[in-house]
Each structure stands twice: as structure tokens, then as C-alpha cells.
Image (cartoon, grey):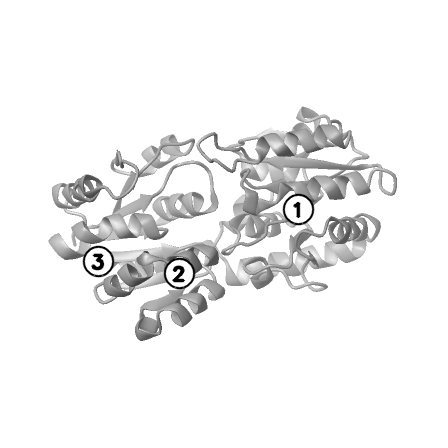
């Protein structure tokens, strides 16, 4: 039986959630059944990781605005390499894949969406009309959370049957590595007495690092042993890159020795091993892979009460939720975790069991494999 050739298409190759989802799929699809390729509009730190698992990696030099030539380049890749299935992550890759995949070569095109706000933006603009037309010829549209799928169904009711949910999955066994804890903590200057609250999120406004910094400022006297570890990087090409502002806020609050910016880190399990709790303060999420990874690492988790996060964190059951943007509410949650370790541990056990049962890697990959055949 010939292998199915799958082409993943991404906006860029920096270590964001959707990029890591596509990388995990590329790594874990059955090599006896699938041969994987990748195309991206921009490079990034994950390029070498993708090259290790893909038969080839292509870069689409798209000009600003509408670029028909970029569509034709994708079409030529599909034809030259006899691609059977295109899996486009986010709308723009789907839009630029449509001509080659569906119109010119009649290949299966699976569109995976990672963001409710992106769906809402599509619906509100000219691309809402375009996507409505494309949906007559698209195979399946995957929402990585139930809220994304429901937003699609409300926005494009004539195509409700096209939308399915495949909840993000993680390799549960990969993320619990306590033997790495002491070495990483020493690397960043944390002592055994320090309680480290960490986050894994690139610097984008929607991730709201500022809220964590302001909560840290509130906790300097009440829980002086708390330290914060930010794993992730900003992007100079992003006009709203908030990393510089976050750095200035840390200095203005006198938190240079309490909030450590680790930058991009390839070994996420090691970073999680150094933490005592995990926090995600985003204004919105799809279905946060970083939160699932923290749960798999058996950490107590704290999240903002927003769509995406509330699909995986149940307040008072498997984690703690705080009002979005409310640094006082976040500070209170952190104090709860620090001062009530037995409760926090109990929540982390429930969270780990949930990830293992609902978000395990094998069932997640199987769901995509069934769409690709």
C-alpha cells in the first residue's frame, strides 16, 4: 500500500502552540502509512526539528497583501511531490492552499483552526464571504477546542456538518521529568526554598505577561519566597511585541531578581521540572498546549477565566482560575497554591488524570490519521 503524502502548511516556524501541534503530528503519524512534508511562509527556531521528521521543508516567499504567485508555488509543491492531503493550520495557510489543493489538483484539504478570535475576525471581514464559498469544497475544518468549533457553526451555519473538534493532545509520559529539577533551578539561580511559578508563552499581547508581573509585585511581602520563570520569546516582526514593555515593567517594579526571562528554550520538560506551579494569564486561548503539558508534568495550574483555558481547567477541581486581567485575583490564587500545598497537589493529580484520559497522544494522532486517509 502506497503511503499517503501529507503536506502541513504553517504561517511560521517559531515555537508557538500551532507550530508545536503540527510538529507533534509530523513526528507521530505512522511512518508506514504516511510521508510528511512541510511548507511555511516564514522560518523560525523549529526549522531543524521539522527537517528531522519531514521528507522536505519548503518556504513560500509571500509578498504583503494578496499574492497569487504564492498560491501557485504551493500548487507546484502539491503537484511535484504528489501530495495527497494538505493540512493547513490557521486561515491564511488554508486560503493560500485552496487553489492548488482543491481547484487545480483535487486533493484533500484539512483546515485546522487554533483561535476563536481568528474565526470572529474572518467572519467580520471579506474573508467571511470567501471562506463561506470555500467551505463548499473543503473537506473538514478542525477546531482544536469545542468553543472554536461552535464559533464556526454559528458563523457559517450552512456548513455546520463540516466542522469537527479534535482536542489537542500531548505525549503525557514526556513531560514529567523530576530528575532534571535541581540542575535547571541552579541554572536560573533558584534555591530549594524558592517557590517557582512558571509560564511557557511567547511574548504576544494576548498572552498578558504584564498581569503576572503585576501579581508578582503584589506578592513581594506576603510570600517573599515566590519567584517567576518566563519561558518564551518576542518577535521583532510583530508590531505589538510586548517583550520590551514587560522588561521595563519588571524593572519599574524592582523585580529583576524575582522574575526571570529565560527566552526560547527547546527542552520544555526540563523547564517544567524547575517549576512548582504553572500560570497562563492569556486574554484568550484556543486550547492551550502549554497548559496540557504543565498538567502532564503534574504541576498545579493557574489560568485566566477565558475561553480555551476553561475547557481544561475546572476551578476548585483540577486547578485555579482568576478573573482575566485582574492581577489581584491572580496574586490570591498564587497565595492559595503556596499556602495550601495539599490542595494544590490534589488538584494536580486530577489534572494529570484528565490529560492522560482525554488528551493523550495516541488517540489525538489517530483522529487526524483518520481524516488524512
User: Secondary structure beneath disc 1?
Assistant: strand
Q: Residues within 10 Å of mark 3 (few under 14, many from 20)?
A: many
Measured Cα–Cα span from mark 1 to mark 3 = 39 Å
The quarter of the picture where the C terminus appears is bottom left
Q: Earlier in the sequence, mark 2 or mark 3?
A: 3
Circle 1 or circle 2, nearest the eye = 2
First-in-chain label (1 vs 3):
3
Q: Secondary structure at mark 2?
A: helix
Q: Quadrant of residue 209?
A: top right
**Could you give the CA–CA distance between mark 2 and mark 3, rounded to whole angstroms?**
27 Å
Please tell me which residue is depicted at 71% across the width and 43% down the height of the picture: 276
Mark 2 and mark 3 in contact? Answer it, CB < 8 Å.
no
Q: Quadrant of the N terminus?
A: bottom left
Left/right of residue 161 with respect to residue 324 in the rendered view:
left
Q: Which residue is denoted by mark 2 in the rendering?
A: 124
In the image, residue 2 above or below residue 235:
below
Q: Can you give x and y, in whole percent of width and height, for residue 351 in the image?
A: 63, 58
Do the CB atoms of the residues marked 1 and 2 lie less than 8 Å apart? Answer: no
Please identify the quarter of the rendering in which residue 148 is found.
Answer: bottom left
| Left or right position of 75 against 293 | left
CA separation, marks 1 and 2? 35 Å
Residue at numbered disc 3: 108
Residue at 59% in and 52% down: 283
Question: Is 250 positioned to the left or the right of 236 in the image?
Answer: right
Image coords of residue 128 (percent x, y)? 33, 61
**Is residue 84 shown to the viewer in this render?**
no
Give the crowd class for mark 2: few <14, some 14-19, many >=20 residues within 10 Å.
few
Between residues 367 and 157, which one lies in front from this camera angle? 157
Question: What numbered label is drawn on residue 278?
Answer: 1
Q: Percent x, y for residue 118?
A: 43, 55
Residue at position x 24%, y 49% in the image:
97
Amino acid at each position: 500500500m502506497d503511503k499517503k503524502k501529507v503536506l502541513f502548511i504553517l504561517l511560521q516556524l517559531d515555537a508557538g502552540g500551532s507550530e508545536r501541534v503540527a510538529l507533534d503530528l509530523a513526528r507521530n503519524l505512522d511512518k508506514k502509512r504516511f510521508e510528511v512534508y512541510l511548507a511555511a511562509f516564514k522560518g523560525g527556531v523549529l526549522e531543524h526539528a521539522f527537517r528531522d521528521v519531514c521528507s522536505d521543508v519548503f518556504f513560500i516567499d509571500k509578498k504583503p497583501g494578496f499574492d497569487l504567485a504564492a498560491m501557485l508555488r504551493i500548487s507546484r509543491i502539491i503537484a511535484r511531490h504528489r501530495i495527497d492531503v494538505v493540512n493547513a493550520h490557521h486561515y491564511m495557510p488554508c486560503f493560500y492552499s485552496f487553489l492548488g489543493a482543491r481547484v487545480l489538483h483535487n486533493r484533500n484539504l484539512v483546515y485546522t483552526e487554533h483561535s476563536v478570535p481568528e474565526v470572529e475576525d474572518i467572519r467580520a471581514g471579506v474573508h467571511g464571504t470567501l471562506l463561506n464559498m470555500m467551505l463548499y469544497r473543503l473537506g473538514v475544518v478542525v477546531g482544536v477546542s469545542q468553543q472554536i468549533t461552535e464559533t464556526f457553526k454559528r458563523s457559517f451555519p450552512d456548513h455546520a456538518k463540516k466542522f469537527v473538534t479534535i482536542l489537542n493532545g500531548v505525549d503525557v509520559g514526556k513531560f514529567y521529568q523530576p530528575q532534571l529539577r535541581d540542575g535547571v533551578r541552579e541554572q536560573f539561580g533558584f534555591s530549594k526554598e524558592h517557590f517557582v511559578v512558571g509560564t511557557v508563552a511567547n511574548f504576544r499581547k494576548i498572552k498578558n505577561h504584564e498581569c503576572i508581573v503585576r501579581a508578582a509585585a503584589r506578592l513581594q511581602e506576603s510570600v517573599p519566597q515566590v519567584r517567576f520563570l518566563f519561558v518564551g520569546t518576542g518577535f521583532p516582526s510583530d508590531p505589538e511585541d510586548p517583550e520590551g514593555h514587560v522588561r521595563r515593567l519588571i524593572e519599574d517594579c524592582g523585580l529583576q531578581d524575582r522574575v526571570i526571562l529565560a527566552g526560547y528554550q527547546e527542552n520544555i520538560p526540563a523547564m517544567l521540572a524547575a517549576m512548582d506551579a504553572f500560570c497562563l494569564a492569556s486574554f484568550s486561548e484556543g486550547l492551550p498546549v502549554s497548559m496540557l503539558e504543565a498538567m502532564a508534568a503534574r504541576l498545579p495550574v493557574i489560568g485566566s477565566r477565558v475561553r480555551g483555558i476553561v475547557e481544561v481547567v475546572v476551578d476548585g477541581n483540577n486547578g485555579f482560575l482568576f478573573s482575566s486581567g485582574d492581577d489581584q485575583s491572580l496574586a490570591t490564587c498564587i497565595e492559595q497554591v503556596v499556602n495550601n500545598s495539599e490542595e494544590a497537589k490534589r488538584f494536580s493529580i486530577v489534572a494529570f488524570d484528565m490529560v492522560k484520559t482525554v488528551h493523550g497522544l495516541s488517540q489525538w494522532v489517530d483522529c487526524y490519521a483518520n481524516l488524512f486517509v
